[in-house]
Image: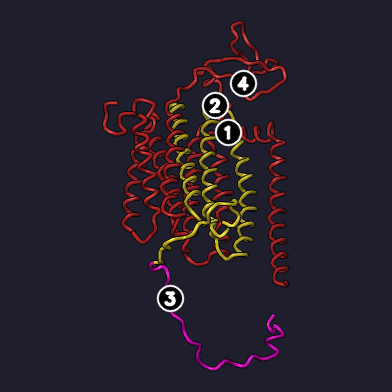
């Protein structure tokens, strides 16, 4: 098996993963999906690292990937904590909500023609409560009798 | 370049540039069409067909590995990886995006594994697909319990997806073009520790068993050896798929030369943990403060 061809194959696949990640980061507006796209770019780079390490016959590439995994785990922890905080303030995962942080003089981004949701909203059947609600005994509420 | 489509490059090492860009354009165009709002479902099918065609053409025209079985396995794994990545980017529900990303990670781990990086394959599944994706799923559950919101089905206006496709195609296409038009180096420079290894009059290494090429003694010198010599002496690297010496060599390299880095990475993980907790506590406090006002 030709090592050079193997290196090229892996580099192409890694570049494709990186390209898809860039594409998703630019296009998507959901914070979580953007984060996933960043992780995907990291995966593309990891593939290239391992391929170069094998081609050169040393451990450097794999070492770098190990530390990349560690740093990516840190990044995911902090990033998701920040995302949760942002979502608690606005109730939305949309990045466009935070466009007030843009530079002075930039025009605001306004959504035009939101697609109506098609078949997404399903209404679940619900039962009206019936019968007589039993009186709760005060003992049962305050004590757990069978423990 | 006499063959039809990508078959011409089976014996050469490079895809012709025009074919490469065509394939890349097909794949990326497929992705871009897939991203359009779900109201026009047939366009997504067109995009899927387009993307799959382009991906198949790219996979066919990749450099030949001279090993049919390996090439088939590699092609299947690469197809799984790239298709599930595309599905991650294009699926409108973040929950499905995370699950597709897990599949893509499993594909990457398999690619690591068939290349001989056993530890990284297992670590990717355990750390990424096992821990990080589950963390993402938890956040999706906490932040967006219902399926897909309106901002998941629309991008930044009508002109951003084509521009993003163009950016991705340019980036990937240029990188691929550069990679495929490179030629392998004839010789490699390595640092050789001359205190440990014997060198004969011609400057060739003799005798001693070579354990590592990554030697950085203070008195190391630059030595040029040919690629073949280096290939046959790099047995220590344990690059084989089921090489039993892999873990031993990997551990020796990780906890030998990179020990300080391992310690720093461990400290970094601890700091990140503290930072995440601090962010949550601070956010809770500031929210309570805003409620009081």
- In which quadrant is the C terminus of chain B drawn? bottom right
Have a look at marks 2 and 1 and say if they share a chain: yes
Badge 4: few (under 14), some or many (20 or more) residues near its Cα, within 10 Å? some
Instruction: Please name the residue that numbered disc 2 is placed on.
Output: A56
* Discs 2, 1 touching: Cβ within 8 Å: yes
* Discs 1, 3 touching: Cβ within 8 Å: no
- Left or right: A9 in relation to B214: left
User: Whole-Å distance between the Cαs marked 2 and 4?
Assistant: 15 Å
Indicate the chain on which mark 3 is placed: A
- In which quadrant is the N terminus of chain B drawn? top left
Have a look at marks 3 and 2 and say if they share a chain: yes
- Left or right: B3 in relation to B173: left
Q: Is residue A30 above or below residue B291?
A: above
Instruction: Please name the residue that numbered disc 3 is placed on.
Output: A123
Q: Position of residue B229 (x, y in %)?
A: 53, 17
User: Whole-Å distance between the Cαs marked 1 and 3?
Assistant: 52 Å
Numbered range of the magenta stretch:
A118-147
* Discs 4, 1 touching: Cβ within 8 Å: no
Residue A61, label in figure = 1
């Amino acid at each position: 098996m030709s090592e050079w061809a193997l290196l090229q194959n892996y580099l192409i696949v890694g570049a494709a993963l990186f390209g898809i990640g860039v594409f998703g980061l630019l296009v998507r507006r959901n914070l979580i999906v953007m984060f996933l796209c960043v992780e995907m770019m990291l995966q593309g780079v990891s593939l290239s690292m391992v391929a170069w390490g094998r081609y050169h016959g040393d451990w450097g590439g794999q070492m770098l990937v190990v530390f990349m995994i560690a740093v990516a785990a840190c990044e995911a922890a902090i990033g998701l904590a920040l995302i949760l905080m942002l979502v608690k303030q606005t109730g939305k995962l949309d990045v466009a909500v935070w466009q007030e942080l843009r530079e002075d003089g930039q025009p605001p981004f306004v959504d035009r023609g939101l697609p109506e949701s098609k078949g997404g909203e399903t209404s679940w059947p619900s039962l009206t409560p019936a019968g007589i609600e039993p009186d709760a005994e005060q003992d049962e509420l305050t004590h757990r009798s069978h423990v | 370049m006499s063959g039809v489509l990508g078959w011409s490059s089976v014996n050469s090492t490079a895809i012709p540039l025009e074919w490469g860009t065509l394939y890349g354009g097909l794949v990326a165009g497929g992705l871009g069409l897939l991203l359009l709002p779900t109201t026009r479902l047939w366009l997504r099918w067109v995009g899927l067909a387009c993307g799959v065609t382009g991906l198949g053409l790219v996979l066919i025209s990749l450099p030949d590995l001279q090993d049919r079985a390996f090439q088939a396995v590699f092609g299947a794994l690469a197809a799984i990886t790239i298709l599930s990545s595309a599905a991650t980017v294009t699926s409108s529900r973040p929950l499905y995006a995370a699950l597709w990303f897990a599949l893509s990670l499993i594909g990457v781990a398999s690619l690591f594994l068939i290349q001989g990086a056993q530890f990284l394959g297992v670590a990717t599944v355990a750390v990424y697909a096992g821990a990080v994706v589950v963390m993402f799923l938890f956040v999706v559950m906490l932040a967006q319990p219902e399926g897909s919101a309106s901002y998941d089905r629309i991008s930044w206006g009508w002109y951003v997806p084509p521009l993003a496709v163009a950016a991705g195609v340019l980036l990937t296409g240029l990188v691929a073009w550069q990679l495929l038009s490179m030629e392998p180096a004839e010789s490699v420079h390595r640092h050789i520790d001359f205190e440990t290894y014997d060198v004969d009059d011609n400057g060739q290494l003799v005798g001693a068993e070579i354990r590592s090429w990554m030697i950085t003694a203070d008195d190391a010198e630059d030595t040029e050896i040919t690629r073949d010599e280096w290939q046959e002496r790099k047995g220590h690297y344990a690059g084989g798929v089921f090489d039993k010496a892999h873990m031993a060599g990997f551990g020796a390299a990780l906890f030998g030369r990179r020990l300080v880095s391992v310690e720093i990475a461990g400290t970094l993980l601890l700091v990140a943990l503290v930072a995440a907790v601090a962010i949550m506590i601070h956010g809770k406090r500031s929210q309570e403060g805003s409620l009081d006002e």
